[in-house]
Image (cartoon, rainbow, N blue to C red):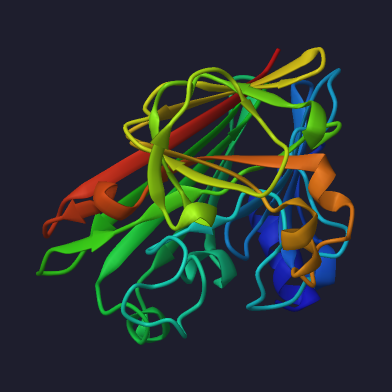
Amino acid sequence: MDLNAIKQLHEGFAIPGVASVVAGGGGLAAVRITSPLASAEIYLQGAQVSSWLPAGADEVIFMSEQSRWGPGRAIRGGVPICFPWFGAKADDPKAPQHGFARTTEWQLESVVASGAEIVVTLALESSATTKALWPHDFRAAYRVTVGSELRLELNVSNTGETPFSFEEALHTYHAVSDVHLVRIAGLDGLRYLDKPDAFREKSREGEIVFSALTDRVYLEAAGDATILDGGRRIVVSKQNSKNTVVWNPWAEGAAALADMGDDEWRRFVCVEACNCLDAAIRLGPGAEHAMTATIRVG
């Protein structure tokens, strides 16, 4: 998007002193919010939240300093939207990892003040480009509410005449002091699929700690997950999400990622609201589904 188009978006959607549309990393358009409750940044590419900084607190969202900014490129960190598939596409290994939503420019629909909170709504609709990868008519609306909490709602509608199934995830990179010291509560005792161990189903009592590559899909995980990072608690609450994904690539995995610094894996954990695999969503014509994640810091 050129600077003139970004300027026009700013003129149409800015809230003086609170919200602006700017050229962010790589010149990509982003909504930048600075309010008494929190500051935040949301890119139109991928509708990707790249920052949420509650007033008086530390940054909650991790972004890689090696992110490769550019049109059509995945941004490393933030909150990528995985849609309409999670991971590799089952019937096409050459399709983009985690779907096309995170590398497609979304339409900015509104930026409004709701009390002390700022609500940004973006939308993505099916097109010839998306149908080349996934042949369905849909509309996705993403509502980001920035305040003392960060609320993310992804609403998918079937605008076609035939049913379809899809997977979805809000792939949140949570900034932490050191992954070696982090614990995650709220998932103990639940069944999970362990990707590094050939997706074997397991369960384990107690809090999650990190000592190696961790990539798990927790099943029937509708409750809260709490990241315990020293004196800080990051609580992830969900609605209409049956899975919680927990991921950290560890040193070996990070070394294979060209857009992540060698030691950056120490500074984040991903705890993701998700519906994937057997929990994929099926929508008939005219039906819609909304998945919400709310993040708060204590």
**Viewport quadrant of the C terminus:** top right
- At horizontal 11% and vertical 57% (from top left) the residue drawn is 284
The reply to whether residue 18 is visible in this rendering is no
The reply to whether residue 240 is visible in this rendering is yes
Residue 243, percent across and down? 39, 39
Q: Nearer the viewer, residue 174 or 26?
A: 174
Q: Nearer the viewer, residue 66 or 11?
A: 66
Number of numbered discs = 0
**Viewport quadrant of the N terminus:** bottom right
- At horizontal 37% and vertical 63% (from top left) the residue drawn is 84
Q: Nearer the viewer, residue 137 or 298?
A: 298
Instruction: Say left or right for 168 vs 28.
Output: left
- At horizontal 49% and vertical 65% (from top left) the residue drawn is 98
| Residue 65 vertical placement versus 185 (above, below) | below
| Residue 99 vertical placement versus 127 (above, below) | above
| Residue 196 vertical placement versus 97 (above, below) | above
Instruction: Say left or right for 137 vs 1.
Output: left
- At horizontal 85% and vertical 51% (from top left) the residue drawn is 264
Residue 208, percent across and down? 60, 27
Residue 99, percent across and down? 46, 69
In the picture, residue 58 is in which quadrant? top right
Instruction: Say left or right for 234 vs 153.
Output: right
Residue 70, percent across and down? 74, 76
Q: Nearer the viewer, residue 133 or 129?
A: 133
